Amino acid sequence: MRQVMEQAARHQLKLAALAGLFAAIGLWAASGTSEAAVYCTRVGYPVGCIVRPAPVVRPAPVVYCQNGVYVKGCVARRPAPHVVYCKRVGYPKGCVMR
């Protein structure tokens, strides 16, 4: 019985050592370079800096005001000019020829 317990204790010790070894290898592999990123303040300054990518700017959707209902931020369309077509030249006054 004592031999079985000693054998189990040795087996557990081997497993713990193996787990510790794998943990150490994992930490070593995960630790990359510890250099901080330095972003450029001007073109090429400081030397070896990283250029930040420009943000993508997309136009916001336009909401038009409709039927006299004005929602906050809506854009009112200009009403189409009232066009009057001429029945004969110059009549009515200000008419548009077709």
Image: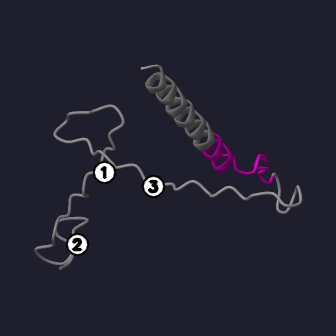
Please name the residue that numbered disc 3 is placed on: 58
Q: Nearer the viewer, residue 65 or 26?
A: 26
Disc number lying in front (3 or 2): 3
Q: CA distance from mark 3 to mark 1?
A: 25 Å
> Along the polypeptide, which appears first: circle 3 or circle 1?
3
Please name the residue that numbered disc 2 is placed on: 96
Q: CA distance from mark 1 to mark 2?
A: 20 Å
- Image vertical order of residue 20 relative to residue 86, above or below: above
* Residue sitting at x 65%, y 41%: 24
Q: Residues within 10 Å of mark 2 (few under 14, many from 20)?
A: some
Q: Verify CB contact (< 8 Å) between mark 1 and mark 2.
A: no
Q: Tag 1's secondary structure?
A: loop
Which kind of residue does numbered mark 2 sit on?
Val
Please name the residue that numbered disc 1 is placed on: 78
Q: Tag 2's secondary structure?
A: loop
Assess whether residue 46 is covered by the magenta stretch.
no
Q: Residue furthest left?
A: 87
Image: magenta residue range:
24-40
